[in-house]
Amino acid sequence: MAKEKKNKEKDNDEEKETEVSPEAQMAGLLQDHKKNHYNFVKETNYKVSFGSLRLDKELGGLIPGVIRLAGRAEAGKTSETLEIIDNHLRVPNRRACLFKAEGRLSKEMIERTPVTFVWNAEEWKDQTCFVIETNNYNLTIDTMRRLVHNNPTGTQYLFAVDSMDALECEKDEERGAEETAMVGGNPTVTGLLLKKMNLAFIKLGHIGVFISQYRSSGPTPKGAAPVKKTANASGGYALEHYPNFVLEFLSPRKGDLITRNGGDADLVTNPFVGRWARVKVWKSPNEKTDYILSYPIKYGRKKASSVWREKEVADCLIEMDYFTRKGAWFYWKQELELIKNLFAKFTNIEEKYNGEGKLHDFLEERPEVTEFLFDYFKNAFDTSI
């Protein structure tokens, strides 16, 4: 009996020694599967300007993860993508990669933006954008995965796909058109890409800008336009759930045109010089869902922001009462702190301007002043997302 009791006590002691706490088990599991999670990785956080004071004020700036830009052709999706790329590349140790799956990156677009594009891998340096002309899904996802997961320099990447509609799997290239459509097409491709890359972008500090266009939602009454729902844009519901932002670029209207001095157009003294781009927010992390936002675009830009930053700055100055207005004349309120700092920092600033057009001219002629005021208002509007 004594021997049996002694053996039982020994077995109990051995069981106690082999017992492992839940936290120890979890630590062991994470260690054994460290290639399959990001718990050991410190999250990288930063913001990138949309290029527009109005968008930055309402949306708070772009953060690591995915943004989806949807809408009809010529609504401003590609131009906004180039704005985001330009602002991303203003910081050292950043690079961009644009997958040109369509022919939208025209010579005129390249001339309008200050982004430096390269097509040869040897020329790809920090603060430049490499262009891969492909609609091959496999090359697209392999490029993203390799650069993100083999990143000894800690480079912060921005990947832009223009557009998701054109991506095609290698297996689909071997199928006929009807068979490709039956297996899912673009929504399947998009869902796979997002599933593999979205969490890595967020955790490791990279940005994906995915452009998609509308797809037909099915039969509609004769003469009626297809119903526009974000789930009906290429990419399906995957592009609803994964992104931080889902923005729909609305078609331009006649009333969106902007004249030089405001008011009615005159071909000689008050011509059209730009337009308002309208964006509907379908999803955002800062409670702006269902908002429709507008920002001004200036025609005829060369190597500059397509967003009419000078008008945005001028509008902020006027709306926030930094001027005294007498008729068409605008006088700086030089007793205000911002204006004191402005006159102390820069020379040859006129004290008054005859009309908004003259104020815009001044800001366009003095980009250093525009940049100073743009940064001031952007910082004043900055809110945590």
Image (cartoon, grey):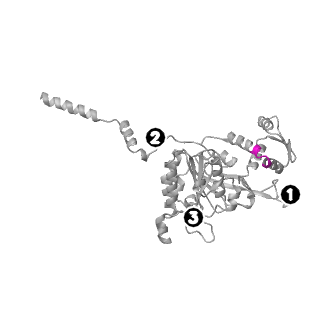
Label for residue 206?
Answer: none
Instruction: Kindly identify which residue carries mark 1.
Output: 269
Three-letter code for the amino acid on which mark 3 is drawn: Arg
Tell me the quadrant of the picture where the N terminus can be found. top left
Residue 38's x, y, as percent?
46, 44
Residue at 58% x, 68% y is 220
State which mark lies toward you, 2 or 1.
2
Picture quadrant of residue 225? bottom right
In this view of the protein, which residue sits in the foreground, 177 or 300?
300
Tell me the quadrant of the picture where the C terminus can be found. top right
Determine whether the residue tagged by mark 3 lies in a helix, strand or loop.
loop
Determine whether the residue tagged by mark 2 lies in a helix, strand or loop.
loop
Give the residue at the far left of this rendering.
1
Determine whether the residue tagged by mark 1 lies in a helix, strand or loop.
loop
Residue 283's x, y, as percent?
58, 51
Relative side of 326 to 218, left or right: right
Instruction: Kindly identify which residue carries mark 2.
Output: 40
Three-letter code for the amino acid on which mark 1 is drawn: Thr
Calculate the distance from the C-alpha at mark 2 to the C-alpha at mark 1.
Answer: 63 Å
Three-letter code for the amino acid on which mark 2 is drawn: Phe
Callout 2 touching callout 3 (CB < 8 Å) = no
Magenta-colored span: 364-370
Label for residue 215?
Answer: 3
State which mark lies toward you, 2 or 3.
2
- The mark that comes first in sequence, 2 or 1, is 2
